[in-house]
Image (spheres, rainbow, N blue to C red):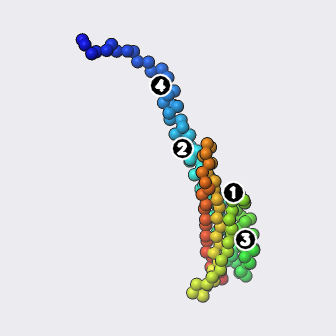
Amino acid sequence: MIGRRPSMPRDERGASAVEFAIAIPVLAILIVGILQLGILFFANAGLQQAVESGARFATISPSPSDSAITARVTSSRFGLDASRITGPTISHGTTNGVDWVDVTMSYAVPLNMVFFQLGPITLTHTRRAYQP
């Protein structure tokens, strides 16, 4: 028989190690990405809680000063690094004869993917409170 090769025995030792070596970087990136997403959600929850606490405080009577509202927001910033916070900013206005106050704050969340670092993602939250 011409053109037919004798079959060689297949050696499959080490195949699992090679497959594992191919799969582990993808799995590691996936796990680190999920952890970074959790950090992002945690920061968003802390930011939202701080801004809404300041907005609730702004609704008491007599109306508190801007510095008192700012103090309330900064005192209730659970889990946030003070060096990454921008604000809070407070603005006032009137709509249809009703006074309102807007409390806005931003927070920059750096994403650290172990081997490289991505630029920060800036989260911003605004809450409007109507004053009595």
User: Looking at the picture, does residue 6 appear above or below residue 36?
Assistant: above
Mark with earlier residue (4, 1): 4
Marks 2 and 1 in Cβ contact (< 8 Å): no
Q: What residue is disc 3 on?
A: 70
Q: Residues within 10 Å of mark 2 (few under 14, many from 20)?
A: few
Q: Name the mark on residue 30.
A: 2
For the residues labelled 4 and 1, the Cα–Cα distance comes to 46 Å
Q: Position of residue 75 (x, y in %)?
A: 74, 65
User: Looking at the image, which is closer to me, 72 or 18?
Assistant: 18
- Tell me where residue 25 sits by quadrant: top right
Disc 4 marks which amino acid?
A: Ala
Residue sitting at x 61%, y 60%: 122
Residue at the front extreme? 2
For the residues labelled 4 and 2, the Cα–Cα distance comes to 23 Å
Q: Does dot 1 land on a helix, a strand or a loop?
A: loop
Is residue 42 in view? Answer: no
